[in-house]
Image (cartoon, rainbow, N blue to C red):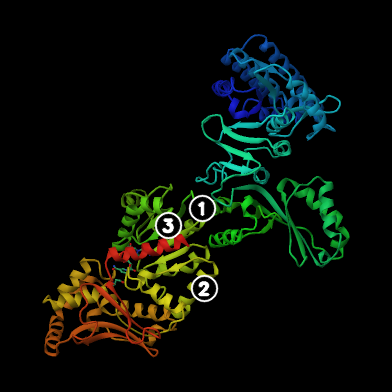
Amino acid sequence: MKVLKFGGSSVANADNCNRVKEIVKKNQKSCKQVVVVSAFGGVTDELERCISLASTRNKEYKSVLEVLKQRHQEMIQQLGVSGNLNEKINAKFEEISELLQGIYLLEDISEKVRSIVMGSGELLSSAIISEFFNNAGLQTAYFDSREYIKTQNGKGVYLNAKQTNLNLESIKEKEFEVALFPGFVASGAKGEMTLLGRGGSDYTASILAAGLGCSELEIWTDVSGMYTADPRFVSQALPIERMSFQEAIELSHFGAKVIYPPTLIPVVQNQIDVRIKNTFEPDDEGTLISKTPGEVRSVVRGLSSVNDINLFTLSGSGVIGISGFASRFFTSLAHRKINVVLITQASSEHSISVGIHKDDTELAVEALCEEFEMEIRMNLVNEPLIEENLSIVAIVGEDMGFTPGISGKVFSVLGKNGVNIRAMAQGGNEMNLTFMVRTKDIKKVLNVIHEEFFDTTYKKVNLYIAGLGNVGGKLLEFIENQYEHLLEEKGLQLIVRAVTNSRKMYFAEDEKLLENWEEKLNKDGVQADLQEFVRLMDQSNLRNRIFVDITASDKVSEVYEQILNSTVAIVACNKIAASSDYSNYNKIKDAAKKHNVEFMFESNVGAGLPVISTINSLVNTGDEIVGIDAVVSGSLNFIMNEFNKGRSFVEAVKMAMEQGFTEPDPKIDLSGMDVLRKLLILSREAGYQLEENEVEHQPMIPESCLQGNSADELLKDLEANNDYFEAWREVMKEKNVRFRYIASFKDGKANVSLKEVSPDHPFYDIHGKDNVISLNTKWYDDQPLIIKGAGAGAEVTASGIFGDIIRVSRN
Ligand SMILES: NC(=O)C1=CN([C@@H]2O[C@H](COP(=O)(O)OP(=O)(O)OC[C@H]3O[C@@H](n4cnc5c(N)ncnc54)[C@H](O)[C@@H]3O)[C@@H](O)[C@H]2O)C=CC1
Ligand SMILES: N[C@@H](CC=O)C(=O)O
């Protein structure tokens, strides 16, 4: 014999009742079934509304009740079970109507009357469904739960298990295919009707399963089992295949609504397996709750959360080391029947904090102020401090016990995402880690923890991109091309949330891949406003956010600190921040460190080449960079190579511009400023506090060519100075040398200038737009460590940025 319980959604209408009938029929031949039904979906809420309206002398209760009556009559018709049911239904509604009339007149209601009205939904639905089953060829016997399930002292949730089990004995011998019981309702010692608490139909079912000696209890609902997290918050949540009784208890207490917590008491005592099934997807496996959880994929079984919790803190010198303080604290709350959901006390014992449902706030303040009235008056204890709008999150898993690193992971990922933990507690059995966070962070919290612990899910990373030119456009193309690969192979979903250039900005509405960004930006974008962009990014409060700076704008680099302070990571190919004043460079790095988010700028030097990461790795492992020699301008190298092939200097510059090797303002390259910035960045990463004014710097071209305000003016000036550049050709030929614009750093001295290199110099043969970075270090002292390869161009730069994005995403 097994028990099947169908909730309100499973019997909300005639179609659903037909599904229920099919499910029951499927077992018809194999075993006797005990079926427990809830009221038709939404009926109990409406009955409660009637009570509330009537007790405030609002006659609208009559029309609400009338609608309920019609709904039941229609159900009878649709299920084709008229008979004498109509009379029964009318009589029941007549009784409810009279009771409500009494409530209306008295403006008051007794517990007994409330139970009769509220429990009517189950009595009505069970009577109709019992008839419906019989008509469908299921030999159904109707049992009124009130005659069997007994509660103590009129309090619904306190079961008189002994009497109940005794009453149920008689049913074991009865002949039936289906025994049908209304859920939720029971009776007290004097036979008065009582209720088993909201959600109590689950409890009815487990009481019956235990009392009738059933082997299994099935809870049929509208979801395919208990999920790893609330799917309304966590779209990647999945049904949990198996869990232990203890895990189910912990999860259901902390908000997992699929099962009503007291339900588990009788089944745990009697070791009855519980399966949560979906009425609308009956073939889904659902969740099996049993003594042992079986094979597990993750140490964490599930997450749950409860909102509307306030944190109460009582502190003061009078709290320290005073025995009996905690007892008075909790007794005073208990006397007012206030449920404490979380307790924490630091070892200093200076304060004690508890989480309490917000509806109990007033009562709790009253209780504590009354209990500690004298201590508060004598300033030994402060008035209770209340922090509102908090939520409790519980991470549950039996295997969490004695597994190091769980809390480390949780707190680290929350810190990275800017979530402050207000209070925390861990049960002694270590299977439940509970903490309080701001309710506004709850979605983010559940998602980041879910991504951290469930390997069946993928990590969502939210990108905000500034700069959509040559390099930015390429990066977006790469992200689109790699989207599926990263999702499937690396478990990473890169979501472009917003893009901006200097004219327009566009915020995407969904989480899908951003396609046709140019069209969307032009059509639906609004005027660009950097502060607004940053504000909306902050306000989104999404997890795993990265701001990507692909501009050459100082305005953008000025907002880095603000961005990092809101715990958004930064990936930049814009070199301005890292090469600005040393104090600013340091301030930005400190902000990143403080908020535990990354600031990465590998593409600042050598585009996609691993230059900064190599220096970092040498320094971190104890090496010392003693000298740097580098050709780090892809554009200048390209220009000199084209010039050497016989092109005029201005032609070579034009080509470099057309191919996207130069900065948005090519004077930045030709003045040597771009190389100077790169040398500053390299030496700083190597551990030196170098400032711009400490770098000896000779522009590559005459100062007179750098005075114009546009690229066109620059080209005109270069044309006009053609003879100057042609003279280089003569010198190079005569001396058998090449000119390279070289950055060097040694013994604290930094220099960027055009130098002659002979054929035996390692910088003589540098092709196209290549960069060469030669590092002399304590360990690489005979031969320098050399990094060489393409150092400019949209593709390689975008790949460098992309690499940083992936590194940040996987941290
Ligand atoms: N081209 C290359 O080979 C390399 C470039 N870089 C860096 O990449 C960055 C971009 O270079 P390109 O794409 O070639 O330049 P670009 O001129 O093609 O694109 C710059 C983009 O930034 C946008 N922008 C400028 N100011 C802005 C603001 N205040 N707010 C929002 N957007 C703004 C512009 O509208 C444009 O979309 C530069 O910082 C450059 O130093 C770094 C390594 C190599
Ligand atoms: N303009 C730069 C591009 C990369 O930083 C260069 O020429 O190297």
Q: Is residue 329 left or right of residue 261?
A: right
- Vertical position of residue 473 compared to residue 358: above or below: below
Q: Earlier in the sequence, mark 2 or mark 3?
A: 3
Dot 1: few (<14), some (14–19), or many (≥20) neighbours within 10 Å? some
Res 13 label: none
Q: Position of residue 237 (x, y in %)?
A: 53, 45
- Vertical position of residue 148 compared to residue 136: above or below: below
Mark 3 is on which residue type? Leu
Q: Are marks 1 and 2 in contact (CB under 8 Å)?
A: no
Residue 687 appears in the picture as rendered: yes
In three-dimensional space, the C-alpha distance between marks 1 and 2, rounded to whole angstroms, equals: 27 Å
Q: Is residue 229 left or right of residue 103?
A: left
Residue at which label 2 appears: 590
Q: Earlier in the sequence, mark 1 or mark 2?
A: 1
Dot 3: few (<14), some (14–19), or many (≥20) neighbours within 10 Å? many
In three-dimensional space, the C-alpha distance between marks 2 and 3, rounded to whole angstroms, equals: 22 Å
Residue extending furthest toward the top:
83
Mark 1 is on which residue type? Glu
Q: Is residue 368 left or right of residue 612?
A: right
Q: Position of residue 712 (x, y in %)?
A: 20, 71
Mark 2 is on which residue type? Asp
Q: Could you say whether the residue bearing mark 1 is in a helix, strand or loop? A: helix
- Vertical position of residue 374 compared to residue 141: above or below: below
Q: Using the image as rendered, state which of residue 155 and residue 621 is in the foreground.
A: 621
Q: Quadrant of residue 353?
A: bottom right
Residue at which label 1 appears: 451
Residue at which label 3 appears: 463
Q: Position of residue 599 (x, y in %)?
A: 45, 68
